[in-house]
Image: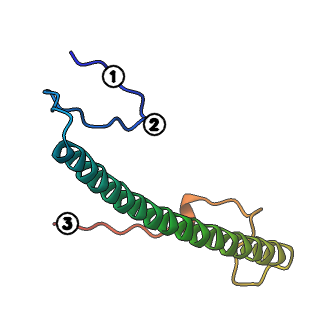
Amino acid sequence: MRPRHRQGMIRPKISTMPRPQTEAATYLDIYKLVNEKKRLQQELGILEERRGRIHDRIEEITAEIANLEVTAHQLRDRDDAQASNPTPDTPRPSTPVTSDNFNTLYLEY
């Protein structure tokens, strides 16, 4: 079983065989580091784009929540106004509902 590394630390790749200290080996190390730097910069750019998209979505959700809260308050106020001034079309809540008020229909299929 391999030991677990901390999530935040990016470990460098290690060669299994040490190379002799030559100019070519040094340039190879430089090349590897440049490639790793490019890869990490590209990954960072992708993460920043994703962070921007997430931030934009959070702003959209916040605006939508605010709009829905305003709509809910308006509907509650309208319902309260209708409850205090009932129209003849709306049934009164104090009227008991009995089974005599319903027409029964039987369907066979």
Residue that lies at the very extreme toward the front in this rendered image: 22
Give the x, y percent position of residue 62. 64, 67
Residue 30 higher or lower than 8, as above or below: below
Secondary structure, mark 2, is loop
Q: Is residue 108 left or right of residue 89?
A: left
Name the mark nearer the viewer: 3 or 1: 1
Quarter-of-image position of residue 104: bottom left
Question: Badge 1: how crowded within 10 Å, few (<14), some, or many (20+)?
Answer: few
Give the x, y percent position of residue 76. 76, 70
Q: How many discs appear? A: 3
Question: Badge 2: how crowded within 10 Å, few (<14), some, or many (20+)?
Answer: few
Q: Amino acid at mark 2?
A: Gly
Which mark, by number, is residue 108? 3
Secondary structure, mark 1, is loop
Q: Amino acid at mark 1?
A: Arg
Mark 3 vs mark 1: which is more N-terminal? 1
Residue that lies at the very extreme toward the bottom in this rendered image: 88
Q: Is residue 63 left or right of residue 81?
A: left
**Marks 1/2: CA distance?**
12 Å
Secondary structure, mark 3, is loop
* Residue occupying the point 85% across, 79% down: 85
Check disc 1 and report the residue beneath it: 4
Check disc 2 and report the residue beneath it: 8
Q: Amino acid at mark 3?
A: Glu
68 or 90: nearer the viewer = 68
**Marks 3/1: CA distance?**
68 Å
Which quarter of the figure is the C terminus placed in?
Answer: bottom left
* Residue occupying the point 54% across, 59% down: 99
